[in-house]
Amino acid sequence: MYSQVLLWEIAAGRPPFPQYVEDNDQLLMHIVEHDLRETDAIANSKYTNLYHRAWSKVREDRPHLTEMVECLDALWQPNIFAASRAGDLQALAWYISHGGDLNAKGEDGFGVLDSASQASDPVPLLRWLLRANVDVANHGWRAISSICNNSASIEAVKLLFAAVATTIPRPENVEPFLTDLCANLEAESIFGTMKFLVTVMGAKVNDTDSAGETALVKLLTYRALDTEALEFLLKYRANPNALDADGTPILFIALREQNGVYLIDQLVKHGASTHSKDDQDRSLLHILFDDDEMAWTNGTDWRKGDLASMLKMVEQLISHGAGVNSRDAGGNTPLFYLLGRAPFTSGEIDALVEQLIVRFRADVSAVNNRGDTVLHVLLGAGWSRSRQKQHGRSIKNAFRLLMANGADPSTRNNEGLTILHSLYRRPYDFNDEARIVTSTAMTNNVDLNARESKYGWTALFMVANSYSKGFTIDSYHRAKTLEYLLGMGAEVSIADMNNRTVWVELISNPHTDTDSMKVLLKHGAKVTFKDELDHIIPVSHYIAETSNNPLADLEYIAELLEIMTDQTSIQDMVNVASWRSGTALHTLLKREIEFSEAAIFLLKKGANPSTLTPFKPVDTTDDVIKAFAINGHFVAPNDIWLLPGEIVGDALTIAANRGHLDSVKAIVELRAECRNLESLRKAFTFAKGEKQADIQQYLEKWIDYETFILGLSSSMMSSIDYR
């Protein structure tokens, strides 16, 4: 009997213990285990009385099952709003038969009629409500809006319209029916309902919702493939030049859709202006050639791999008045976008360029606000060459086509950049095409040694500086590019506005490569390892940090220094300490064990192992690090700040911690100042991993030896008679 009470309560949505409302099993277990018999905030006295009698210890006082059913059934109140939305006709019938308020509103402000109109099949519910005389006049507008947002049922709309649901003016908080209907993503078809709303109910196709959008804007945004609805709206003179909430013309929305060619055709036929521009002054042609991911987020990008549709779209737009030479806010024409940003293959680009230039006379002499020509853009100025590379772009055919149709290769942009500056600022794709462009440009009087106006750089500087632009280029390609340009007449001795040569620019890169250095030296570069301020350039540090063959590279630098006169000494070079990174020796010891030979080479060339630098120990417990810090070992100088987990250490400590056995031996045996007990013990402390067992044994022998020598020395000193 108790379980029956509980089941009725649970079924009614009013359990005696609300904290267990989501878990009926837990509720039952809790009552059995704790013998709970108290109600919790039960307001109805009949319900409370029934509940307490059910738990009475006197059997005769307990209610009969029939009494419980009658009482609970009389008290049960369904959530009529949720039931109506779910299409629960039985709950609605019960609610009506028990005198429920048909005009009540839920917490969300929706009434019973509104809720019923949200059901997937609202017709049966609406018939019950209409027979029960629900207040259609005051709830009808919102109810029809709910139908348009959900089922889009024409029968439901007809029922409410026949019941005079729209006799009063549309309330301010109710959107136009057509905008709601056209934003409906769930309904399979909205055409019949749309036709009834317009032809019978008089809905206005150009009414705007609270966001300022018309039904046509909503349709293209949410149901662009619904061609039947589109043609109906246009037939009834929907405005084809309407704007969305952001002020974007409707044609821009249509262009990005999967069936964009069809949509544009329909809209233009009905008066859409192809002269429209967005908030960046981009025309439809600009957007068509743009690789802006934010602009093409409405599903599949139909442009890619469909050249025929692209050619048709271009023809369609231009033939209806789109300006082939219109400018965006940056002064770029659609041809600039096509050459610099379009996400197409080389073959597609070539075909589209030919269409624009040959057939539609696109201006090949156009210059944007930066002063770039279409040739600058094709070769990479101001645009993402990585995108071109990603799409397998080839520039050869487009370059020849532009040149054949009058493009001027000698024009410089506002920064004084020639097209060769643009080509060689990112030389990672140096190939035969670059050679073709270079030779053609020079034949047309483009000066290979022209200096741009910002730094005074030539194309040769662009290659030497390529790493600072954030582009990865291996030493082979850089060296090959430098070799080619120098062979074509590039001057290696030109200095920029800061009096830096190409040599200085090259070795100032963090990724110094000796292959390129050899090329410059072969062509007469003046060797120096100091910058224009007479500061030493930390080439050895760069090599130690980035080279895959640091020993060979360091040997080459040392060889250069040895044959030079009045230049930076080797010892000065190897002891340049970059901020927080220490010297080249420290950097090598922080890398893999196979670089030990390079570290030993630096030691032999005068690297100072006693210099302190921050590092993060490996295979070391926190307790060891804390004890190390507390005891004040290797206190950081004022100009060194530490990150969490870092300590300061000399080369011996770092080598021991990283497992560089050969380097440890070299430091101890080559540098007497590192054989003091304090240094040896600190190194021993941080050689704690399994890989460092050999190092521990080695250091232990030296510690024993130095301890013995120190004890012997003290004994000898104490035996001396000073009288």
Image: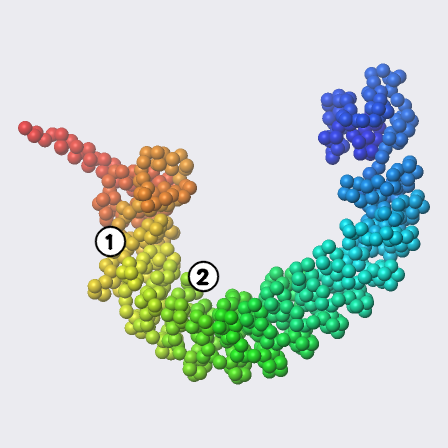
Total numbered labels placed on residues in the image: 2
Q: Nearer the viewer, residue 272 or 69?
A: 272
Image point (32%, 45%), residue name: 639
Q: Nearer the viewer, residue 177 or 538?
A: 177
Is residue 59 shown left or right of residue 528?
right
Q: CA distance from mark 1 to mark 2?
A: 34 Å
On residue 470, which mark appears?
A: 2
User: The C terminus appears in which quarter of the rendering?
Assistant: top left
Residue under pointer 1: 606
Image point (49%, 73%), residue name: 372
Q: Position of residue 465 (x, y in %)?
A: 39, 65
Q: Position of residue 676 (x, y in %)?
A: 24, 40
User: The N terminus appears in which quarter of the rendering?
Assistant: top right
Disc 1 vs disc 2: which is toward the camera?
A: 2
Is residue 193 shown left or right of residue 663?
right
Image point (68%, 78%), residue name: 319
Which type of secondary structure does the marked residue at label 2 adopt? loop
User: Label 2 is placed on what type of residue?
Assistant: Gly
Q: Nearer the viewer, residue 666 or 521?
A: 521
